[in-house]
Amino acid sequence: MSLTQRKARPLVRDAASLRDDRLFIVACDDTYAPKQYFEFFRIPRVQVHIVPTEYGKSSAEHVLARLENIDHEEDDELWLLLDVDHYAEGNHLKTFLTALTKARQRGVNVALSKPCFELWLLLHHEDEPAVVNLASCADVEATLRAKLGQYNKTKLKEEHFPLGSVSEACRRAIKLDESVTGGEIPNGNTSRVYLLWQSIASKALPLQLPRELRTLLDL
């Protein structure tokens, strides 16, 4: 379901204390994990609204279309949160690249994860050498499950991803991203969700930014 009217947006803007909040609208190709993950965090004067995939339409083109159907204001940030996995292979590659080009032309930011968003979750717990050779999302999920004792993408546990672990995940992700080649389509495992977190931190009011996230401004 798209949001076609300003009043239908998830952020209540009729309260004076919220009127100037910075809004990040993030469309993703996943139904469960990203939405739950970002709902764990409360950052003063920043709202992150996740638009999950619907009806199995998870291609980059469908994700971009859902994002563009949402009414937004000029100072809102628009993001695509995409997995590389099989959508950047074979016949899918051309349409994937076309969607990325359209997003860039329309001022939409992109945060890719290879092979999948779960790699970002794993970086909250493991250094980059432990994730570089995980060949598939199934491997990443299995490693997460072994590390956490359990993992169900439909029922993430907030205690597994405390705010204090975000900066460390970003540091690891930056180091990992610097090691991969391929440019826009990475050849190795990486997660660029750190770009979204860096933008969130930079748009928060400095005095209200949680202490655990202040190091993001220096990464």
Image (cartoon, rainbow, N blue to C red):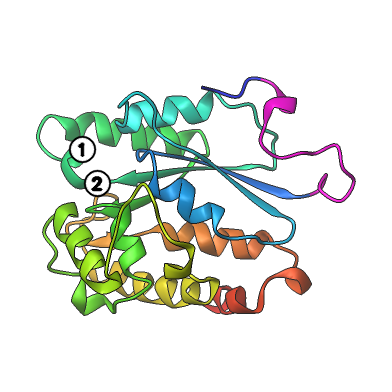
Q: Is residue 127 above or below residue 204?
A: below
Residue 40, position as x, y percentages in the image: 54, 58
Name which residue lies at 75% across and 65% down: 205
Q: Give the residue number, with chain letter if any, for mark 2.
A: 84
Q: Of residues 81 and 187, which is closer to you in this image?
A: 81
Could you tell me how many numbered marks the image carries? 2
Question: Are the two marked residues, 1 and 2, in contact with CB atoms closer than 8 angstroms?
Answer: yes
Magenta range: 5-20
Residue 6, position as x, y percentages in the image: 72, 26
Classify residue 163 by image quadrant.
bottom right
Local crowd at mark 1 within 10 Å, few (<14), some, or many (≥20)?
A: some
Classify residue 188 by image quadrant.
bottom left
* Image mark for residue 87: 1
Name which residue lies at 15% across and 54% down: 138
Determine the main secondary structure of the stretch shown in magenta.
loop
Residue 24, position as x, y percentages in the image: 60, 46
